[in-house]
Image (spheres, rainbow, N blue to C red):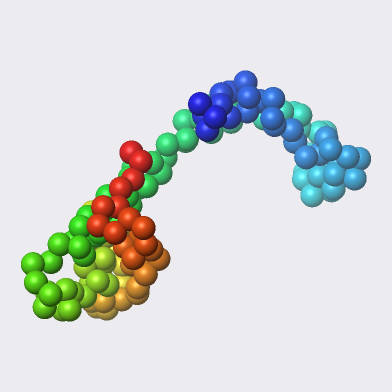
Amino acid sequence: MLENWCWTPSVIKSLSCHYSYLSPEYMKSWLKESDQESQPEKQIPDEQIESLVKSKHVNGALFQLRVLHYSILDMMIHTPETHEAIENLNISVLYNKLRKDLMQLDGPEVLGEGFEWGHAESIFYHVTGDYDAGYYGYL
């Protein structure tokens, strides 16, 4: 409940205020920088509020794919068959190939860099932290 209350149109309206209403100096600055001769509406227009509310979940699918990416990577790192397989595991390649397969996002591999570029897996601290094998996300 607490993370959603601010997406109520009436709440957005009540929290909004054009900065030109905050002080006479801001009003002078706004008039100087804009081509307008009068002050805009004090509160955000309803059409803009509607647009904001509609865009609330615009990147939600990408976030869930990231959680899925980390979850699968975690299991791939923690389930090799042998100790030798672990020693030969190239985590950068594994990370980048999995990222490409799941998210369908191109990286430097399309420029001939291969999949060993970067080390983004190094920011995934859950692998060596408290989660061990069993990273999870809140879906």
Residue 32 at x, y percent in the picture: 84, 48
Residue 118 at x, y percent in the picture: 35, 74
Left or right: 35 with respect to 67?
Answer: right
Left or right: 20 with respect to 104?
Answer: right
Residue 90 vertical placement versus 98 (above, below):
below
Q: Residue furthest right?
A: 24
Instruction: Residue at 12%, 75% (x, y): give it.
Output: 83
Instruction: Residue at 66%, 25% (x, y): give it.
Output: 13
Residue 35 vertical placement versus 104 (above, below):
above
Residue 27 vertical placement versus 102 (above, below):
above
Q: Is residue 103 visible?
A: no
Q: Judge by depth and name the residue closer to the eye, 40 or 116.
A: 116
Q: Residue furthest left?
A: 81
- In which quarter of the view is residue 123 placed? bottom left
Q: Residue furthest front?
A: 130
Q: Quadrant of the C terminus?
A: top left
Residue 89 at x, y percent in the picture: 18, 74
- In which quarter of the view is residue 37 placed? top right
Instruction: Residue at 69%, 25% (x, y): give it.
Output: 14
Instruction: Residue at 90%, 45% (x, y): give it.
Output: 25
